[in-house]
Amino acid sequence: MVESGTRWHPAVLYQTTGQGTATTLRCDLCPFRCVLREGQTGVCGVRRRVGNRLETATFGTSVRHWTAVERKPFYHYRPGLKVLTLAAPGCTFRCDYCVNFRVSQVASGDADLGELDPATPRELVAQAAEAGAAIGLSYTEPGLAPEFTLALAEAAGRAGIDLLWKSNGFLTPAALDLVAPVLAAVNVDVKAADEEAHRRLTGASLAPVLDAVEALRARGVWVEVTTPLIPGASDQPSQYTEIARSIARIDPAIPWHLMRFTPSFRMQNEDPGAPAELAAAREAGHAAGLRYVYVERALGPEGRATGCPGCGTTVVRRGIWELESLDLVDGRCAACGTRLEGRW
């Protein structure tokens, strides 16, 4: 249920057909394409019909704090960059393991929509500019906030501030066409290997997610992919091997981040992921042809380091969520001159 104090904002990406009381309104933001009655919200819980128009409760942020770009995670996008991280409420998925359910799971009632931060896009951009930082939308689903993203982009363009997303990638082609031109980089979660497992975990289809990875890459957005090794969805060798192959078919230079499963939300009784699983998945990624495969914490500094694909020299060293050293010259290995894909 949406709280009465929430500030609603006109939304984009919807269609109306018919006239009068017979008018149909369809949201075209995500592949669910919800057809809404008067006052009804979509599957996401944050877009609603009022009369013959659509409104969003995501024009603003319920989270605001500073992080390093490595924490998004982005390992091949401007290492060491500081990011002002924001989160509008809501998500199109209903993942049982969600660690951010208190702000993401609005539709199920596990998250309270509440009041958004009253800061304007211009104020947020000014804050980022003063710190020499980018702006990132994360923790919830930024794809539900195209209006907020576009307003940030309008202010950020004048200040030269990059916009980053951490997204589930569950968007329509029309939504991707709208937001891709203003995004510098997107990290997309690929949570399962096949349709059945993905639907069981998220309530949504996998195909649009993989399509989004490919579409964003084709539009010149820097893309990285994250896969948490979730019991029953992505923690078995056949599952993470197929995910690696799917990414490699799009582009073997896409960095792949493997995340340890942490029991949370409705999966609190599951065991935490084992480091041996992550090590095996990393090997599977390399075997599938991926050039850059990372494990954030469970395998220590070696799991976070970037090796030159030409000579094997370690060219980027990272601590936990921070840059330690960068041995690249104009994006090339200082030892052998091999160019590493990324935005260095």
Image: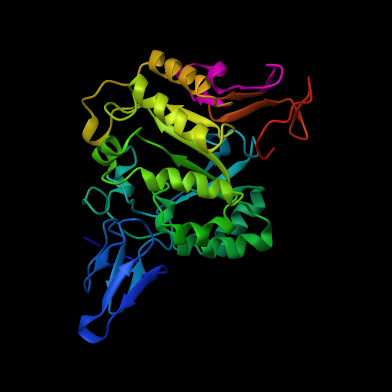
Residue 269 pos. (x, y %) = 21, 25
Residue 36 pos. (x, y %) = 24, 68
**Can you name the residue that lies furthest to the bottom here?**
20
**Quadrant where the image shows the C terminus:** top right
Q: Is residue 168 visible?
A: no
**Quadrant where the image shows the N terminus:** bottom left
Q: Is 255 drawn above or below residue 309 in the view shown?
A: below
Q: Quick one: 290 or 305, which is closer to the camera?
A: 290
Please check the rendered image and state whether residue 300 is part of the magenta-colored stretch, yes or no.
yes
Q: Which residues are magenta?
A: 292-315
The residue that appears at 78% across and 24% down in the rendered structure is 334
Q: Is residue 87 left or right of residue 67?
A: left
The residue that appears at 21% across and 50% down in the rendered structure is 108
The residue that appears at 23% across and 31% down in the rendered structure is 267
Q: Tell me where residue 321 sits by quadrant.
A: top right
The residue that appears at 24% across and 86% down in the rendered structure is 20
